[in-house]
Amino acid sequence: MIQIDDETVIVGVDLGFQFVKTRNYVFENGCKAMKVEPSVADRTMRISGRYYKVGEGRSGLSEDMTDGEEGRLLIYASIAKEMRRQGLKKAEIILAVGLPFANYGAEKKKLIRYLQEPSDVCFSYERGKYQLHIKRVIVFPQCYAAIAPRLKNMQGEYLIVDIGSKTVDLVLVKDGIPNESRSTSIERAIVKWIRHIQAELQSTYGRQIPENEIMKIMTEEVNNLPVDIAKSIQGLLRDFVNDLEGNITELGYDMDYTNIIYVGGGASIARKYNTKKRSNVAYDCDIKANAKGYEFLAEQMVKRWRNE
């Protein structure tokens, strides 16, 4: 969160298909309506007379974050967490969010409408009451946002790779300036990786493995899977990372000589399962990088508006 004046704050939220990230918090994207008031206040939201558990567990992977009310409620929970950290109960919100690079132009207006309706919101979350006015929604391209705060220090040519849930975003940066004509997205990332892994395991072992157990392998959490199935998942992940680098090569980038930086939560997957160790490849595994970048870019925009 960035304080602009006594009433207005910028809040950057990276609304992922598995986790929600802000500058200071990472939490699961579960969101479930409750028939009665929950007995535990943690992760409980009350809004428009209804109760929800927000941030508890992971929701099933979805192709569209604007499908239903869940996305808005996750955004409100994100804002509440950041406001609580600053001791705020009421604020004018400039909301900074992102979209995959390839989907930016087509989905930007839809996402803005989704997050601005309604603009005035009152709710309680985890024992606190909050009153928000969504003053403005600003949407930025993912991946670009992750490295935006350090663009001025990036001399030479770099390929930034952001492995997300829905897409792998590629942004080419030369002397701190993104080259949009050579930047793109690959429409095959973690969501589709998991579904392919599930299909392979079903075929090989005759078992439907839950996506959350596969995610535990990806994020190196303790899991309950048999050793042979866990090893199969790890092998498939190595295949995916190698295939990804093959796709990047096909797009005209030399993986042996181009300076490459993997960013965001997916960088840890690339680092662990990349079978080729190269000195020209770096990994920035800050899962909150895009959320921080959204705030940075929004702050620059607000400063320009106020100087015009």
Image (cartoon, helix red, strand yellow):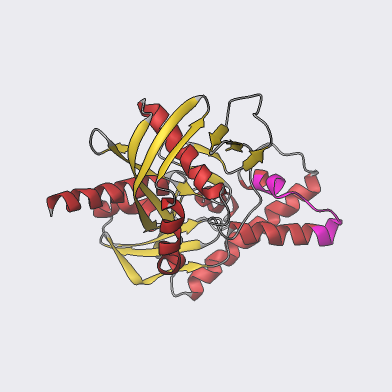
Left or right of residue 261, residue 198 in this image: right
Q: Can you tell which quarter of the image residue 44 is in?
A: top right
Q: Is residue 164 magenta?
A: no
Considering the whole magenta stretch, tell me its main secondary structure: helix
Looking at the image, residue 205 lies above or below residue 249: above
User: Which sits in the foreground, 1 or 52?
Assistant: 52
Looking at the image, residue 169 lies above or below residue 8: below
Left or right of residue 97, residue 191 in this image: right
* Rendered residue at 32%/53% (across/down): 148
Residue 136 visible, this orientation: yes
In which quadrant will I find the C terminus? bottom left
Residue placed furthest toward the left: 308
Q: What percent of the width, then of the height, locates residue 38?
A: 65, 28
Residue placed furthest toward the right: 206
Q: Is residue 210 magenta?
A: yes
User: Which sits in the foreground, 205 or 124?
Assistant: 124
Residue 255 visible, this orientation: no
Left or right of residue 30, residue 285 in this image: left
Q: What percent of the width, then of the height, locates residue 280?
A: 41, 57
Q: What percent of the width, then of the height, locates residue 10?
A: 32, 42
Looking at the image, residue 24 lies above or below residue 200: above
In which quadrant will I find the N terminus? top left
Left or right of residue 236, residue 133 in this image: left
* Rendered residue at 67%/45% (across/down): 217
* Rendered residue at 46%/66% (across/down): 103
Q: Can you tell which quarter of the image residue 256 is in?
A: bottom left
Q: Which residues are magenta?
A: 202-215
Number of dots carrying numbers: 0
Residue placed furthest toward the front: 49
Q: What percent of the width, then of the height, locates residue 304?
A: 18, 53
